[in-house]
Image (cartoon, rainbow, N blue to C red):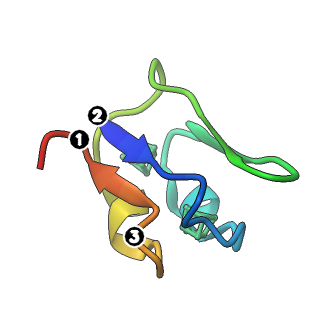
């Protein structure tokens, strides 16, 4: 599971474009995260420039 921190997010859309299963959607003021679709590839964690996506429990 990944955890999203809205306070850090810059809404650059980077995570949305790398997610292979389209679990992320760029909304006006946040990223919509669908945990049911997520396959835990951690691509969003790696690409986020500000660490707004973290691996949960680490
Ligand atoms: S961990 Fe992978 S599948 Fe899950 S939201 Fe991030 S990019 Fe998408
Ligand atoms: S890559 Fe990071 S800063 Fe950019 S939209 Fe995604 S969570 Fe926000």
On the image, the x and y values in percent for residue 31 come to: 67, 47
Secondary-structure class at tag 2: loop
Q: Is mark 1 within 8 Å of ligand 1?
A: no
Q: Which residue is mark 3?
A: 51
How packed mark 3 is, by other alpha carbons closer than 10 Å (few <14, some 14-19, many 20 or more), is some
Q: Quadrant of ligand 2?
A: bottom right
How packed mark 2 is, by other alpha carbons closer than 10 Å (few <14, some 14-19, many 20 or more), is some
Question: Viewer-nearest of labels 3 and 2?
Answer: 3
At 49% from the left and 52% from the top, the residue drawn is 5
Are dots 1 and 2 in contact, CB under 8 Å? yes
Quadrant of image for the N terminus:
top left
**Image side of residue 54 versus residue 48, left or right:** left
Work out whether 46 lies above or below 45: below
On the image, the x and y values in percent for residue 50 come to: 46, 77
Mark 3 or mark 2: whose residue is earlier in sequence: 2
**Image side of residue 19 versus residue 22, left or right:** left
Q: Which residue is mark 1?
A: 56
Label 3 to label 2: alpha-carbon separation: 15 Å
Q: Is mark 2 within 8 Å of ligand 1?
A: no
Image label count: 3
**Image side of residue 52 versus residue 45, left or right:** right
At 52% from the left and 62% from the top, the residue drawn is 18
Q: Which residue is mark 2?
A: 1
Q: In front here: 49 or 21?
A: 49
């Amino acid at each position: 599971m990944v955890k999203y921190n809205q306070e850090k997010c810059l809404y650059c859309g980077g995570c949305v474009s790398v997610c292979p299963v389209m679990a992320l959607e760029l909304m006006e003021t946040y990223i919509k995260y669908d945990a049911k679709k997520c396959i835990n590839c951690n691509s969003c964690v790696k690409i986020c420039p500000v660490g707004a996506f973290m691996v949960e429990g680490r």
